[in-house]
Image (cartoon, grey):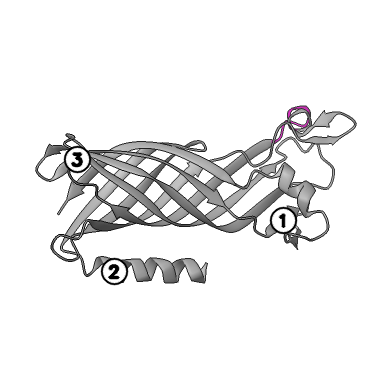
Amino acid sequence: MKKAVVVAFAALLTAAMAQKFSVEAGAGLYGNLGGQLAVVAEDFTPGLPLGVRLGVGFAQSDARDDGYDLGGGTTWGDYKKTNELSEWGQNITLSLDVLYKVAGLGLPVEVAPYAGIRYNLFSGGYTDPQNKISGTKSESVSTNQFGFGAGVRLAYPLMPNLSLVGDLGADYYLNACFKRVHEDDSGNKTERTVCPGGSGYDSLNELVTQPEWVFKLRVGAAYRF
């Protein structure tokens, strides 16, 4: 998490050198339904077609793969349904992109391919509200992942300072350590960390839906100051 804060601080210092800013809000698909707030800094020097975008995104997620075979032909989806478990999951993503504004296309929209780095905080789990699993009240799994992404940002001017924005791209995330927290019926919690290459990591990675390839399609608006 400290590394993510350093990246965000460096981006803000870079933005402070810019002459134009845009605040951008969008919603759409990022593996699942979600949205993003971002600040775009442009025009660092006259004629330089580069911009920097710092964003914070949120998306819902399944915590576990319903099709994962727990053994004996029973899937996680079957187990969840039988025991009436309540499942939740989410991704919070910090992104830092460099945009290149393409000139001379003769289009009514501004086209800006981009590439950058990602830092994703995944968390998900389940609770047992009907007390059908002896010794288990809840269980959660979380990971903090680094990743990379690329795409294209399209901006169509509606007013001098207001644009309709579209964002199409894909991100790839590296495997990260799982932090697994089990809470028993008495409220006692047990924590365990499993990292890539460790015992049981591969099977846990198949069950838990931490992101790997994520495709995104968002539509929103940007206001330029």
Q: CA distance from mark 3 to mark 1?
A: 43 Å
Q: Amino acid at mark 1?
A: Arg
Closer mark to the observer between disc 3 and disc 1: 3
Against 18, residue 107 (above or below) is above
Q: Earlier in the sequence, mark 3 or mark 1?
A: 3
Where does the image place residue 76, in percent across and percent down from the top left?
76, 34
Name the residue located 17 percent from the left edge and 34 percent from the top edge.
108
Q: How far is mark 3 from mark 2, CA to CA?
A: 23 Å
Q: Secondary structure at mark 2?
A: helix
Which residue lies at the image location 60% right of the left edge and 50% below the top edge?
A: 123
User: What's the residue at 90%, 31% (across, down)?
Assistant: 72
Q: Amino acid at mark 3?
A: Ser
Callout 1: 10 Å neighbours few (<14), some, many (20+)?
A: some
Q: Mark 1 or mark 2, which is nearer the start of the sequence?
A: 2
Name the residue tied to disc 2: 14
Of badges 2 and 1, nearer the viewer stands 2
What numbered label is drawn on residue 154?
none
Q: Is residue 185 visible?
A: no
Q: How many angstroms separate mark 2 from mark 1 (CA)?
A: 37 Å
State which region is magenta.
Answer: 80-85
Name the amino acid type tagged 2.
Answer: Thr
Circle 3: element type: strand
> On residue 163, which mark appears?
3
In the displayed structure, does residue 29 sit left or right of residue 109? Answer: right
Q: Is residue 8 left or right of residue 196?
A: left
In-front residue for pair 224/87:
224
Residue 199 in percent (x, y) is at 83, 58
Q: Choose between 126 and 192: the one closer to the eye.
A: 192
Q: Which residue was labeled with disc 1?
A: 180
